[in-house]
Image: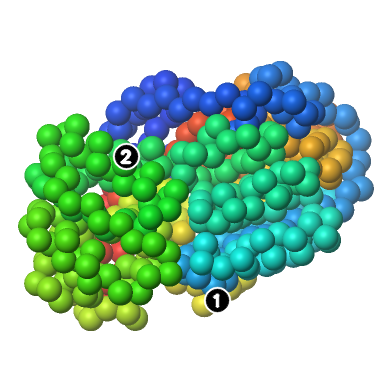
Amino acid sequence: MSVFAKATASRSVRAVFTGVAMVGVSALLLTGCASGGGTTPTDEASSAASGDAKPVTAGDRDLTLKIGTLLPQSGGLAFLGPPEEAGVQLAVNDINDANLGMTVEVIKRDSGDTTTDTATTSVTDLLSQDVSAIVGAASSGVSKTVIDQITGAGVVQFSPANTSAEFTDYADKGLYFRTAPSDILQGEVLGTQIAEDGKSTLGLIVLNDAYGTGLADTVTKTFEDAGGEVVATSLFNEGETNFTSQISEVTAANPDAIALITFDQAKIITPALVGTGYPGDQLYFVDGNLSDYSADFAAGLIEGSKGTLPGLDVSTLGDFTTRLLEVDPALKDYSYAAESYDAVMLIALAAYAANDTAGSAIAEYLRQVSGGTGDGTTVTDFTAGATDLAEGNQIDYDGFSGPITFDENGDPTEATIGVYEYNADNTYSRIN
């Protein structure tokens, strides 16, 4: 599959985190102190941060890789669980079908949200089954509750959807990676979009956690740097179900636009907000709540509202969506499916390169197989990657979510943020 060739043509808002941002976003430089988001590296897993490619031994492989998932089957991000789990399963199927000396077993568990201890219980179970890596969580807040437990056990934590900037320099022993970009980028794109739409005042209703407040801070700074004014910011905590006070606080300031930086609380907030008389086409959504609301809202309720979502437009990626639907025919949203697929592919290719399924060995090679050490033949599927590695060659995996290319902090150095607009039936389409 010539994934990257197709993906590049559709890219309109893209940043390369090498000190210069490109195509519609301002210059960004994301910095950290160590491999995989750690401070000063002290263990062997951190050696990939040096930028020097480790050797790949030629020869056949006979590896069994056990991966756990910690994705939302319940809680405020439950709508993201099905596409993420479908992406994981599709990758596992592709690796096993390749029959190139690696067998992958996946054990799926629920992350829940921060109102429960579901994630801790699930991680304890996964670690007891000797997984080498855990894909998840989707929620940055949930990942913060288990990252020490996972990395402390010498297991790779690889999130397809964590966007909090706090993970860039987190002391994770070089074992934390993600295919989703930091919210520094999404916040800039959203704040810029609101300003470019001619809004001069902005209100925000924000989930009070690492994801919500971090994204809100960047949106606020970007919008105000563009000449706008944030006139009200109202916070709520995970688990709240009544948002009357937040809606009243923000609408009292009479903003031109309101950004909802939430998870599925948007299902309650949005109709209540429009019910007060606020225009349904003046709302802005984010990746945590950009969803198909055709079955939830009255027709036309949010037609014309916009939102942002990291990642390429999955509809441009050939038969990827078709194959995801074969895994899960009930899928309606595809958010972070590509990032989940690529997380599994990168973990598998790193284990293949190392000829070792230990978490520390995988971490040593993850940056390398992503092209982060600066060399390697570009590959876009497991078969091509494994074939090159078996010949002792270096590879650079470019996936369905884009070129990825990890930096020394385990963050992708390239990213795409799509801008979407809601249709009359409360589904959304990409406009930029």
Residue 224: x and y in percent read 18, 36
Question: In terms of image quadrants, where is residue 289?
Answer: bottom left
Residue 13: x and y in percent read 34, 39
Question: In terms of image quadrants, where is residue 359?
Answer: top right
Q: Does residue 141 appear anywhere in the picture?
A: yes
Model colouring: rainbow
Q: Nearer the viewer, residue 30 or 173?
A: 173
Could you tell me which residue is drawn at 20 percent across and 39 percent down? 223
Q: Which mark is residue 329?
A: 1
Q: Does residue 85 appear anywhere in the picture?
A: no
Closer to the chain start, of discs 2 and 1, is 2
- Give the residue pinned by disc 2: 218
Q: Type of residue at label 1?
A: Pro
Could you tell me which residue is drawn at 70 percent across and 50 percent down? 149
- For mark 2, give the secondary structure: helix
Question: In terms of image quadrants, where is residue 369?
Answer: top right
Q: Are marks 2 and 1 in contact (CB under 8 Å)?
A: no
- For mark 1, give the secondary structure: loop
Spatial CA distance of label 2 from label 1 is 37 Å
